[in-house]
Amino acid sequence: MALNGIDLTIYQGEAVGIIGSNGAGKSTLLKLLSKVTAPTEGEIDIYGRIASMLEVGTGFNGELTGRENVYMNGAILGMTKQEIDAKMEQIIDFSEVRDFIDTPVKRYSSGMFVKLAFSVAAHLDSEIMIMDEVLAVGDMAFQKKCLDKMKEAADRDGRTVLYVSHNMNTIRQLCDRCIVLNQGKVVFEGMVDEAIEMYMGLRSESPEIVSFENLKRQRKDLVDGIKISEIRILNHDIWKIKVGEKLQFMLTVKANKVLQNIGYRSRVVTVDGNSVSVLLAPRLITCQAGDVISIPLEADLSELVPGRYMLTPVLYGANEYGGWHFYDHIDAAIVLEIETQEGFNENMPWEQRWWGSVKLPELVDLRKQ
Amino acid sequence: MSDIQNNYQKYHSHISSKHRWFDLKLKEVWQYKDLIWLFTKRSFVVTYKQTILGPAWIVLNPIITSFIYAFVFGGIAGMGTDGIPQMAFYMTSTAIWTFFSTCLTNNATTFTSNAAVFGKVYFPRLTTPISNVLSTMIQFLIQFGIAMAFVIYYVIIGQLSPNWWAFSLIPIVLIHLGMMGMGLGIIISSMTTKYRDLSVLVGFGVSLWMYATPIVYPLSQLDSQFNNNVLKMIIMINPVTMPVEVLRYAVLGKGTIDPFFLTTSWIFTILVIVFGIMVFNKVERTFMDTV
């Protein structure tokens, strides 16, 4: 059961953030509210019309032009042709893709695609907006524009915004109130800062072996061929190391195709969603169909300051067009704790919020050389 | 601001785990009529976008099929056409059968082929099968136009005399077969969200059904050629038979219309469409968890 015993009231005009780890039930909650799936038990009462964006550009068809897709997408989201006509100019302006509006969207870059799609949803005549991490794509300037638009909708127009994200910064910027879900239950409801602290507390370090064998991948653009079956830490029995210490782990993958030069990388992100860096292992794996390969790896994380980090493992390869595609991608799969130890920055406590997560080598006094 | 405040009160929706079987939710479908039209247009535009001949295929398809039928059934098997010129006979028959079978088979995969969109946004799901029927109808009208070119040619050279007044019945035939095809299609689609086995059988079922329908032969052939009453009964009970004969009566001037079986066919259609929508609405609620 993805959700159980949820009792929530969202008030008119609020901007509410919903946070929780993967599988906590966030998406299920949004799906229920937007009527994509029906509850097996219980009731929901909604006052006002809902514009839901669980995905960017639902119903967009590559063969149709930008303008045709605006009509299509707008109609899917519940607008009539008349309403779309009236808003067409605003939508095109906001999307910043005016020059390409009559080009088939299969020729769009992914950024342009997202801009146009968000623009349609943002111009719906609705009282309630539901957003599932759609801002994760698009350039920084546009992300800010989207956040501002939503904030404006909530503050000035009196709309209600429900927003799900792994990025705590955007939650802080946008939301007045926050709900923390864990294993299908509401574990906290209240102030944003407290909620984020609560959520970060829930994400404790991963156990020695993290298995992905039966995990349903969230990304829809993964290519079949090779998948990560488990990752285990070698030099400890949980994912907790001391600052300055090296991290040794075993990556196990399972292939069902002949593949060459598959790269592995893992994004390192702080628990509140800020990217720190990436660990790269290009052209790591060459495999036959049916192979199960275990590769011991060592990561030097000595520059990272104590704290909790999330790792997002990815298997990637080159495609025939010279671009890249993903074979596997598991968002925030592992939580790694880096413990402080004697000798680390003795003079002052490290304020991660202001100083960041990387400790560069101390400055060298050239007079002493 | 005040508009928004009012709208909060104006639009109220209630979602419940309880399902009301007899609510067909047709009013909501009507509110999305623009979407139905856009879906119809899209399926048309997209199907022929990356083909050389484009929409010409709609025309070529029935002509080629009719030639094959004329060769196999009219030539080799020596089946009669009730004295009607072969091309006019087969063109009309293929057009109407293609209409019915496409309504059925296209809608039989409604849930599985739209899973990506259905999983992300809500709109009345019934808009998809309805727009399928509409775009199939447009396709039929084009094919019917070609068939009419043959018909008119034969009328001019005096080999054919249609019942022109009965042309007004053709829209009714289309609604009749469209609803039947869609009803059966969405029932199949609702039953195949969890187990796909049935969808494999649909292809076989439909081609078998064609031979149980007077498509490549006229209904009158049964009297002269067979003395098999069981076979004749099956063909008469077959709900597609009567609407096809009505169309033939109008366009080709010869058709065997039996009021009793026409009525049973209508009753069947109404049962199928109402039951279909009920099952469809029920499955729609939770199919995302099973698909």
Image (cartoon, helix red, strand yellow):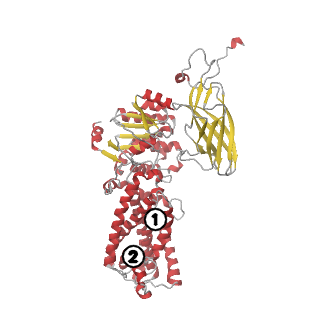
Across and down, in percent, residue A3 comes to: 43, 42
Q: Residue at x 49, y 46 (%)?
A: A100
Position of residue A276 in the picture relative to residue B202 (left or right): right
Vertical position of residue B171 compared to residue A46: above or below: below
Residue B241: image tag? 2
Q: What amino acid is found at the position of numbered circle 1 in the picture?
A: Thr
Q: Residue at x 34, y 34 (%)?
A: A13
Across and down, in percent, residue B185 comes to: 42, 63
Q: Residue at x 46, y 76 (%)?
A: B211
Q: Earlier in the sequence, mark 1 or mark 2?
A: 1
Residue B105: image tag? 1
Tell me if mark 1 has few (under 14), some (14-19) or many (20+) residues whose alpha carbon lies within 10 angstroms of its own.
many
> Of helix, strand and loop, which one carries label 1?
helix
Vertical position of residue A154 compared to residue B260: above or below: above
Q: Quadrant of the C terminus of chain A?
A: top right
Q: What amino acid is found at the position of numbered circle 2 in the picture?
A: Thr
> Of helix, strand and loop, which one carries label 2?
helix
Tell me if mark 2 has few (under 14), some (14-19) or many (20+) residues whose alpha carbon lies within 10 angstroms of its own.
many
Q: Residue at x 36, y 32 (%)?
A: A155
Q: Can see residue B192? A: yes
Q: Quarter-wise, where is residue A367 in the image?
A: top right
Vertical position of residue A264 compared to residue B182: above or below: above
Query: Foreground residue, B211 or B91?
Result: B211
Looking at the rendered structure, the number of numbered marks drawn on it comes to 2
The answer to whether dots 1 and 2 both sit on one chain is yes
Across and down, in percent, residue B122 comes to: 40, 49
Position of residue A316 in the picture relative to residue B261 (left or right): right
Q: Quadrant of the N terminus of chain A?
A: top left
